[in-house]
């Protein structure tokens, strides 16, 4: 499997989704109930995943299923990660339309979907450590603060090469914050490359990035008041602002809710 999939990933030939959240266990991955039941030569999967980004176009999904019950001592026990071929019979993908009109999130339903034994990733019942590392990648990547970047670039274009003092200061402050988040993201990438588990650091990047992206439309709207409408047609900026405002609510949820992230940060700092 590795020799087949990895080269295709490197060539950019395949798209992946991440199957973690479920209807009754969004941020609490320990509560996952989608079951993988052992059968001859593999596993039968039954259950539902929700909010799976790009599942409607994915070739594969990295999914966590419950292969045995959790223990009283360890709620993390009993979860196993699988490489799921999305063309497998028994898998139904239902796109979820958002207020923005996008359908990037999906419900994925499994009904006796068969997964071969060689599609198990890592240890059976021991997927939590893998999932923790993967979440660190997801939460600290540049997409966590660049999803509304187009609004900033459009503001710069609309203000022109010689903005007034208020406009220049506003742009400078936003760019400085963006550069800081990029440095933080690169730092987490270095930790991951070194084999560390920067769970807290990744959560901080995601939390700060979410705040910045959700505030960006409002801050840009304030600065747009200084655009010379006689010299610049800023209808494109208005369209970008409208779209960024519509997608703002989902930014808090994807990759882990703000409340969950701050709980992780608090525990990491010894505050709870």
Image (cartoon, rainbow, N blue to C red):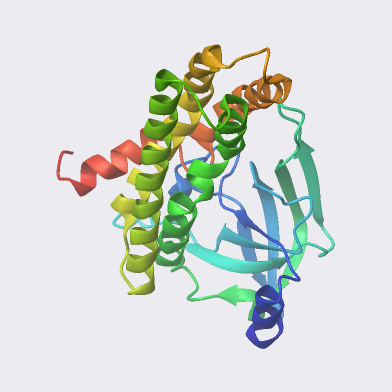
Residue 145: in sight, yes or no? yes
Provide residue 66's location: percent of width, then percent of height: 54, 58
Asked if residue 240 is positioned above or below residue 32 in the image, the reply reads above
Which quadrant of the rendered structure holds the C terminus?
A: top left
Where on the picture, by quarter, is residue 17?
bottom right
In the image, what residue occupies the spot 58% across and 36% down? 153
In the image, what residue occupies the spot 53% across and 34% down? 251
Viewer-side residue, 262 vs 144: 144
Residue 75: in sight, yes or no? no
In the image, what residue occupies the spot 38% across and 26% down? 169
Asked if residue 196 is positioned above or below residue 243 in the image, the reply reads below
Does 30 sit left or right of 36 as displayed?
left
Where on the picture, by quarter, is residue 1?
bottom right
Viewer-side residue, 219 vs 86: 219
Provide residue 63's location: percent of width, then percent of height: 60, 60
Viewer-side residue, 142 vs 62: 142
In the image, farthest residue toward the left: 270
In the image, farthest residue toward the bottom: 3
Viewer-side residue, 177 vs 77: 177
Where on the picture, by quarter, is residue 195?
bottom left
Count how many numbered circles sit on residues in the image: 0
Provide residue 220's location: percent of width, then percent of height: 52, 22
Provide residue 4's location: percent of width, then percent of height: 71, 84
């Amino acid at each position: 499997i590795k020799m087949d999939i990895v080269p295709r990933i490197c060539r950019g030939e395949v798209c992946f989704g991440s199957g973690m959240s479920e209807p009754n266990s969004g941020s609490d991955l320990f509560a996952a109930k989608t079951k993988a039941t052992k059968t001859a030569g593999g596993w039968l999967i039954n259950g539902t995943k929700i909010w799976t980004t790009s599942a409607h176009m994915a070739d594969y999904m990295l999914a966590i299923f419950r292969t045995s019950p959790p223990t009283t001592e360890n709620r993390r026990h009993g979860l196993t990660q699988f490489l799921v071929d999305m063309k497998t019979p028994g898998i139904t993908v239902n796109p979820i339309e958002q207020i923005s009109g996008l359908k990037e999130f999906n419900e994925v339903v499994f009904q006796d979907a068969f997964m071969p034994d060689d599609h198990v990733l890592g240890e059976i019942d021991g997927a939590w450590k893998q999932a923790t590392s993967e979440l660190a990648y997801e939460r600290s990547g540049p997409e966590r603060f660049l999803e509304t970047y187009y609004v900033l670039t459009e503001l710069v274009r609309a203000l022109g090469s010689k903005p007034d003092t208020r406009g220049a200061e506003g742009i400078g402050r936003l760019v400085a914050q963006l550069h800081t988040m990029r440095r933080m993201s690169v730092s987490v990438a270095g930790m991951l490359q070194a084999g560390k588990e920067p769970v807290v650091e990744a959560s901080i990047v995601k939390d700060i990035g979410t705040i910045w992206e959700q505030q960006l439309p409002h801050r840009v709207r304030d600065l747009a008041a200084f655009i010379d409408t006689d010299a610049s047609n800023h209808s494109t900026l208005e369209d970008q602002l409208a779209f960024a405002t519509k997608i703002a609510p989902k930014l808090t949820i994807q990759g882990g809710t703000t409340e969950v992230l701050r709980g992780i940060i608090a525990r990491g700092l010894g505050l709870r």
